[in-house]
């Protein structure tokens, strides 16, 4: 049981009820990862909007973003997010043995060279943000990434660190 009280579907009103209804229509249920934010309409709405933005991203693939979340969550020891993103990666055709390989050696992630370079950059940021130097950015730009994509991928990973902290702190249960 989570350490914070969550609003269940039958108790939801206002924006929370509307968000829950949209999730049920899209996914068939409301994940605990969203229920934990139900005490604050602002926070749940912000998280839903953030998710929607990245789900429709034009240049950052869903598989890349799921691998970023998976590896950040492995580092942050967030069992909920590791499990959830493993499931998402299965939907992208990533096999169970590949998941283990990705976790132990991110360079083996099933991504093209351009996406792999961005993934490895993001992992460097999350591990030691002070270690980033100009040549790291230049290398990504030579592969075709622009400032917007680099920033948004970094933001996605940094946000994941925060989500992992919240989920761990409040002990949310797997769905």
Image (cartoon, helix red, strand yellow):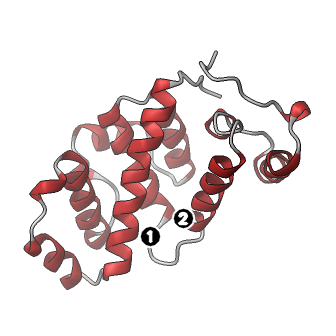
**Closer to the camera, 107 or 27?**
27
For image coordinates 18% across by 74% down, the residue present is: 137
In terms of image quadrants, where is residue 38?
Answer: top right
Q: Position of residue 8 (x, y in %)?
A: 81, 30
Q: Quadrant where the N terminus lies?
A: top right
Q: Are marks 2 and 1 in contact (CB under 8 Å)?
A: yes
Residue most extreme to the top: 1
174 up-or-down from 71: above or below: above
Q: Earlier in the sequence, mark 2 or mark 1?
A: 2
Residue with the mark numbered 1: 60
Disc 2: CA contacts within 10 A as few (<14), some (14-19) or many (>=20): some
Q: Is residue 56 visible?
A: yes
SS for dot 2: helix
For image coordinates 85% across by 45% down, the residue present is: 17
Q: Position of residue 27 (x, y in %)?
A: 76, 48
Q: Quadrant where the C terminus lies?
A: top right
168 up-or-down from 101: above or below: above
Q: Position of residue 12 (x, y in %)?
A: 86, 38
32 up-or-down from 98: above or below: above
Residue with the mark numbered 2: 54
For image coordinates 59% across by 26% down, the residue present is: 174
SS for dot 1: loop
Disc 1: CA contacts within 10 A as few (<14), some (14-19) or many (>=20): some
In the image, which disc is placed on residue 46?
A: none
- Judged by depth in the image, the label closer to the viewer, 2 or 1, is 2
In the visual, does 174 lie left or right of 158? right
Q: Position of residue 140 (x, y in %)?
A: 21, 76
Q: Is residue 67 visible?
A: no
In the visual, does 60 lie left or right of 1? left
For image coordinates 13% across by 62% down, the residue present is: 132
55 up-or-down from 169: above or below: below
């Amino acid at each position: 049981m989570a350490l914070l009280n969550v609003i269940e579907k039958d108790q939801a009103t206002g924006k929370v009820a509307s968000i829950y209804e949209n999730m049920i229509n899209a996914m068939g249920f409301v994940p605990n990862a969203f229920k934990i934010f139900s005490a604050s309409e602002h926070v749940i709405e912000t998280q839903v909007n953030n998710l929607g933005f990245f789900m429709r991203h034009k240049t950052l693939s869903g598989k890349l973003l799921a691998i970023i979340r998976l590896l950040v969550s492995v580092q942050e020891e967030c069992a909920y997010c590791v499990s959830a993103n493993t499931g998402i990666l299965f939907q992208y055709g990533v096999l169970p043995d590949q998941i283990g390989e990705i976790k132990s050696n991110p360079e083996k992630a099933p991504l093209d060279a351009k996406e792999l370079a961005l993934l490895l950059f993001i992992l460097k940021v999350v591990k030691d943000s002070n270690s980033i130097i100009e040549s790291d950015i230049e290398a990504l730009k030579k592969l075709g990434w622009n400032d917007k994509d680099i920033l948004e991928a970094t933001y996605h990973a940094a946000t994941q660190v925060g989500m992992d902290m919240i989920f761990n702190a409040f002990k949310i249960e797997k769905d």
